[in-house]
Amino acid sequence: MSRPGQTENQTENAPEKSPQTGHFDADTIRRGAIACLPLLPSTIIFGAVLGVLSAQRGLSLSELLFMSLAVFAGSAQFVSVDLWRETIPSATIIIATAVINMRYVLIGASLRPVFRGRPLWVKVSGMHMVADENWAVTMTQKDLANPGFLLGGGIFLGVVWATGNTVGYLLGGGIPDPEVYALDFAFTAVFAALTIGMWKGRVDLLPWIAAAIGSIIGHFVLPGTWSILAGAGAGVLVAALTWREDMDADSLEAECAVEGREAYGAPEGITDATPVTETGK
Amino acid sequence: MTQFPDLTSFSLEAVLTILGMAAVTYGMRLGGLLMADRLPQHGRWAHVLERLPGAVLISVWVPSALSAGAIGIAGAAATVITMAVARNLFAAMAVGMVLVGVGRYFIGN
């Protein structure tokens, strides 16, 4: 468990543009699975809690496992199972699932660099096992462009999740309360920690502040998981508004210009627009 | 030995509901990616897309830290600081979770 999840130096294979690794290499899949290892205890406990709830609500174990592997989205499953009755309110459940999982549109969109240059079948087969956790772990990898890493984490989480479901369903109770061991906080903690790894430079500052404020406001005024969309929407809006011609995301010069403001004196964007006297401050 | 439940028991209604849930979820996952593929690779949209994962991630955990109360906010702050200093996911998670667990034990929520 204590082995470091991230390898620091992945730069020996210099060309980053075209994918030089296979689509789903066994080794990459394994690395992706190992990277999700810290999530094992909380995933299994929450899977078990869902199993207990499912048994109470009258789902069969096979239906629960089918749901866990076909839908593969924890929070939507909790709400759906909670709504489950003898006469299943199908429309309500499907609409609730759609609303809760709407963030996956954004998560899918943000995975573009991971699937860059890959054929359609890789996208079609790689996008199913995408949970918040393996997505976040994948996005913070240095050599990010790899669908196998994402899939490895997804398979690992899926197996653990389904195992937890089965254990909870069969025990029908007696699962330790996740709150006692702060296991419910593991998800908050992993996302908070991984945010650090997503920092790309000062251009992130304002969009991130906007996302935090938007999600906090959403948390207090909107129901359920709408706060995620409120925060992401605020972040996107501010990112769009703060974009300038000279900070093209793909150009290395822009990144250096942002990172190296202090090191190189005046930022390039200002020198040609302002008189020389300004640069002295 | 307790008997293992029958793994072939499916009701049609349940299967259709689950398929509906799966279709909307997968549709949004793949749809998001395919839509992003159609956006330009440079300029404003690419810049926005680069900021998107951080914005989504923050919006996932900030409200859940708030829901966990003062100890949750403290735990999240401790996690972020540990990660920024130590750059170790496991250590950062451990610090946050131990703080929250101990805090709940002694203080309650």
Image (cartoon, coloured by chain):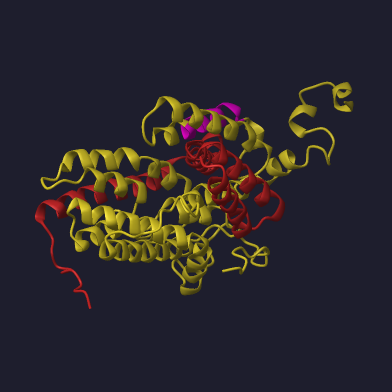
Residue A120 in view (yes/no): no
Residue A191 placement (x, y as % from top left): 53, 48
Q: Is residue A42 magenta?
A: no
From the viewer's perspective, tell me whether residue A12 is left or right of residue A162. Answer: right
User: At 40% from the left edge and 54% from the top edge, which residue is drawn?
Assistant: A130
Above or below A162: residue B42: above
Q: Is residue B71 above or below residue A20?
A: above
- Kindly identify the residue that appears in the image at 20 percent across and 63 percent down: A62
**Which quadrant, please, contains the C terminus of chain A?**
top right
Q: Is residue A254 above or below residue A120?
A: above
Chain B: colour as depicted: red
Residue lying at 62% horizontally and 66% vertically, measured from the top left = A4
Check residue A240 for magenta coloring: yes
Q: Foreground residue, B6 or A66?
A: B6
Looking at the rendering, the stretch of residues picked out in magenta corresponds to A231-243
Q: Is residue A106 visible?
A: yes
Q: Can you name the residue that lies furthest to the bottom here?
A: B1
Coordinates of residue A122 in the picture (x, y in percent) = 38, 61
Q: In the rendered image, what is the letter of the chain coloured yellow?
A: A
